[in-house]
């Protein structure tokens, strides 16, 4: 019995040892693969995070720039509007003063130009012609003169009309103008000035 137990062959150590080496090599390969996958994922995440941050930063910068441009435009528009209002107020005040001065001098405001004033004046007409004389005063430059037009009305009906243009006038100057009424030789009727505007 003892001899049989001594003759039992021990398990092959070499195979078992080699099997352990193969298991360790597979585990190492698997570990390397997992580590590579983790490293790749980490690198991809880092790249995504970096470029994503760059994109977000760029988008934010563009939004800030657009807002600044819009704010600057709004501020500019407000300044222009305020300047225009101040100018309009000054013009209105000046015209009101001019109207008062013109009224004191016997002038009436033009029906179609706030810077032109007129009055009827005495003058001679040509033979067999009917005409009207007007005096005009301007409060702005009229380099091409002042256009004057008038109608002759009889019983509320326009029976004649005519027009004339003065010479060039500068602000504060005045002139006289004769308006003829072609085809109308009667002294009857009422004259109405219909236009006195700077050209």
Image (spheres, rainbow, N blue to C red):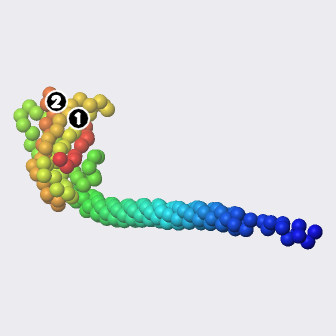
Residue 152, disc: 1
- Residue 1 showing in the rendered view: yes
Q: Secondary structure at mark 2?
A: loop
Residue in the foreground of this view, choosing between 109 and 30: 30
Residue in the foreground of this view, choosing between 94 and 53: 53
Residue 9 is situated, as x and y percent measured from the top left of the image, at 80, 66
Residue 79 is situated, as x and y percent measured from the top left of the image, at 37, 65
Q: Quadrant of residue 26?
A: bottom right
Q: Are marks 2 and 1 in contact (CB under 8 Å)?
A: yes
Badge 2 is on which residue? 184
Distance in Å between CA atoms under marks 2 and 1: 9 Å
Q: Residues within 10 Å of mark 2 (few under 14, many from 20)?
A: some
- Residue 56 showing in the rendered view: no
Q: Secondary structure at mark 1?
A: strand
At x 14%, y 41%, the residue is 164
Residue furthest left in the image: 127
Residue 24 is situated, as x and y percent measured from the top left of the image, at 66, 66
Image quadrant containing the N terminus? bottom right
Residue 131 is situated, as x and y percent measured from the top left of the image, at 14, 38
Residue in the foreground of this view, choosing between 78 and 139: 78
Q: Residues within 10 Å of mark 1 (few under 14, many from 20)?
A: many
């Amino acid at each position: 019995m003892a001899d049989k137990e001594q003759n039992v062959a021990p398990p092959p150590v070499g195979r078992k040892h080699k099997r352990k080496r193969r298991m360790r090599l597979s585990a190492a390969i698997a570990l390397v693969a997992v580590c590579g996958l983790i490293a790749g994922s980490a690198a991809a995440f880092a790249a995504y995070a970096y470029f994503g941050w760059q994109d977000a930063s760029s988008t934010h910068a563009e939004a800030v720039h657009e807002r600044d441009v819009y704010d600057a435009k709004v501020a500019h528009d407000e300044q222009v509007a305020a300047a225009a209002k101040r100018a309009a107020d000054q013009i209105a005040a000046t015209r009101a003063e001019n109207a008062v001065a013109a009224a004191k001098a016997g002038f009436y405001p033009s029906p179609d130009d706030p810077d032109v004033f007129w009055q009827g004046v005495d003058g001679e007409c040509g033979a067999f012609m009917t005409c009207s004389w007007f005096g005009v005063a301007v409060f702005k430059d009229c380099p091409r003169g002042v256009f004057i037009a008038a109608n002759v009305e009889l019983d509320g009906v326009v029976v004649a009309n005519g027009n004339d243009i003065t010479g060039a006038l500068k602000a504060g100057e005045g002139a006289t103008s004769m308006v003829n009424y072609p085809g109308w030789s009667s002294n009857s009727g009422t004259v109405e000035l219909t236009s006195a505007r700077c050209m």
